[in-house]
Structures are given as C-alpha cells and as structure tokens.
C-alpha cells in the first residue's frame, strides 16, 4: 500500500501514543510533534512529554522500472522529563523518563500503522541528553513504507 504523504505516519504515531499514555491528571504525558515545538523555549516546553520526530529515511529497495520504492523511515520518540528532585545525581529524572520510555516502547513495538508495509521495529536511537534539569531519552522506530509513481491524468 503506497502512502499519500511521506509524513503520513506522524499523526498515527501521535494518536497511538495518546491512546496509550495518560492524558489527564497528574501523570499526564503530552505527545507533541516537531511543529508543536518549533518556537517553544526549553524552559517553557511541557513536561513530561514525548516528542514525535521524523529523523530521516533511506531507500531500501527500488523496483527495476523505477516506478515504486520501499523506504525505511526512522521515527524518533523523545521522552522529555524535567525533574529537579535529586538534581545533582539526576536519578529522579532518569526514573521518570525510563518509565515513560518503557510505555512508549510497549505501545509502538510491533504495531503496524495504516500505510506502513510492516510493523514498527525498535532500532538503535541517538544517545540521551541532559539540559537545565531536563532529561531527553530517545527511542527510534523503523517503519517500512512504499512510494509509487502516480499515473498521468
């Protein structure tokens, strides 16, 4: 099944995470896209949150006539947590981020969004980051998608 948009999986991933992570009360986890974060200063960003970002894509296979290709997209889900308790060691922020990351992994591993050619697979993410009391813990998921030539009208 070919995609109508190369970013078509983004809203599906966001919807999946919102359906599996707490969306109300004190344990609420915001699920945001790169567009949501474009002009937000670090100190103003919601926390805890999961940022859904397309990291990139690579051509995995192209049909001999060039009219169709399978791409491997890499989608990052970056858990962002600000927790100043135990600030010197950062252990509270790591514990919070680790629990949310486990829930994200459980929601997306092996799940096949509409339009994907195969279930999502967990792949090696970039390293974690720390800044001003925030911990950023990325998970990366590979998604196979198909693109095809559109017929002439």
Image: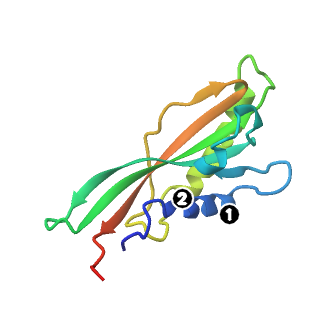
Residue 60 pos. (x, y %): 27, 54
Choose the circle earlier in sequence order: 2 or 1.
2
Count of numbered marks: 2
Which residue occupies 56% across, 64% down?
Answer: 12
The answer to whether residue 33 is seen in the rendering is no
Judged left or right of residue 150, residue 122 is right
In front of the other: 103 or 136 = 136
Is the residue 40 above or below the residue 25 in the image?
Answer: above
**Judging from the image, what secondary structure is the residue with disc 2 in?**
helix
* Quadrant in the picture for residue 48: top right
> What residue did someone put label 1 on?
19
**In this rendering, does residue 113 appear at all?**
yes
Label 2 and label 1: CA atoms lie apart by 14 Å
Outermost residue, front side: 153
List x then y, in percent, for residue 148: 29, 70
Classed neighbour count for the residue bearing mark 1: other residues with Cα under 10 Å, few (<14), some (14–19), many (≥20): few
- Direction from residue 27 to residue 107 in the image, left or right: left
Q: Is residue 98 above or below residue 129?
A: below
Split into 4 quadrants, where in the image is the C terminus?
A: bottom left
- Evaluate if marks 2 and 1 touch, with contact meaning CB atoms under 8 Å apart: no
What residue is disc 2 on? 10
Query: In front: 16, or 42?
Result: 42
Q: Position of residue 82 (x, y in %)?
A: 74, 33
Residue at image coords 65%, 44%: 37
User: What's the coloring here?
Assistant: rainbow
Instruction: Determine the residue positioned at 71% across, 24% down.
Output: 132
Please state which of the two labelled residues, at mark 2 or mark 1, is closer to the viewer.
2
Above/below status of 39 relative to 6: above
Most extreme residue toward the left is 64
Q: Is residue 54 left or right of residue 89?
A: left
Residue found at the far right of this picture: 25
Q: Is residue 90 above or below residue 118?
A: above
């Amino acid at each position: 099944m070919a995609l109508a948009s190369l970013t078509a999986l983004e809203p599906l991933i966001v919807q999946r995470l919102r359906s599996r992570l707490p969306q109300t009360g004190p344990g609420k986890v915001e699920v945001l896209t790169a567009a949501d974060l474009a002009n937000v200063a670090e100190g103003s960003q919601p926390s805890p949150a999961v940022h859904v970002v397309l990291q990139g894509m690579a051509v995995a296979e192209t049909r001999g006539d060039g009219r169709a290709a399978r791409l491997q997209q890499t989608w990052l889900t970056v858990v962002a947590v600000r927790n100043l308790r135990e600030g010197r060691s950062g252990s509270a922020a790591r514990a919070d981020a680790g629990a949310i990351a486990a829930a994200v992994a459980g929601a997306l591993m092996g799940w096949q969004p509409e339009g994907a050619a195969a279930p999502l697979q967990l792949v090696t993410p970039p390293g974690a980051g720390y800044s001003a009391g925030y911990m950023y813990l990325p998970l990366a998921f590979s998604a196979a998608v198909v693109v095809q030539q559109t017929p002439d009208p």
